[in-house]
Image (cartoon, helix red, strand yellow):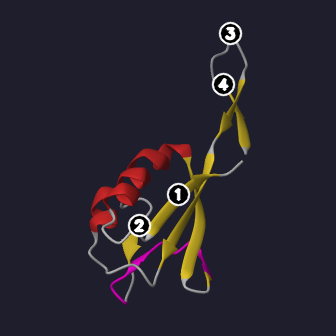
Amino acid sequence: MINYISSKPEKFMTKDIKKYKVTIDSDKCIGCGVCVSLCPEVFSLGDDGMAQNKDFKKQDNLLVGEINETQFATAQQAEQACVENAIKIEEVK
């Protein structure tokens, strides 16, 4: 979890920035591109036509990475719209 200091000069406060773990199951992905259309800042289609994120790490048939709370809302829309349930998002505690 990352902390930052408020830019308001009258009051310095810290706020926790939430992180989320995103998992893409390459075996389930059919390359329809819905995730890319809803959340291009997190998802793209690779050379194989399947969902990816170049910053995610490959673990067997999974691509695993983290996003921050500013990307969460649109990434969650992509997760919910994925017809094959190939995307999973969970808060990092």
Residue where numbered disc 3 is placed: 10
- Badge 2: how crowded within 10 Å, few (<14), some, or many (20+)? many
Question: Disc number at residue 52?
Answer: none
Residue where numbered disc 2 is placed: 43
Q: Position of residue 57 (x, y in %)?
A: 62, 77
Viewer-nearest residue: 85 or 42: 85
- Give the residue type at disc 3: Glu
Q: CA distance from mark 2 to mark 3?
A: 39 Å
- Badge 3: how crowded within 10 Å, few (<14), some, or many (20+)? few
Magenta-highlighted residues: 48-58
Residue 25's place in the image compared with 41, above or below, is below
Callout in the foreground (2, 3): 2
Asked whether the residues under the numbered discs 4 and 3 touch, taking CB atoms below 8 Å apart as contact, a structural biologist would say no
- Quarter of the rendering containing residue 65: bottom right
Residue where numbered disc 4 is placed: 6
Callout in the foreground (2, 4): 2
Mark 2 or mark 3, earlier in chain: 3
- Quarter of the rendering containing residue 39: bottom left
Which image quadrant: the N terminus? top right
Q: CA distance from mark 1 to mark 3?
A: 37 Å
Q: Residue furthest top?
A: 10
- Mark 4 lies on a secondary structure that is loop
Q: CA distance from mark 1 to mark 2?
A: 13 Å
Residue where numbered disc 1 is placed: 89
Viewer-nearest residue: 63 or 70: 63
Asked whether the residues under the numbered discs 2 and 4 touch, taking CB atoms below 8 Å apart as contact, a structural biologist would say no
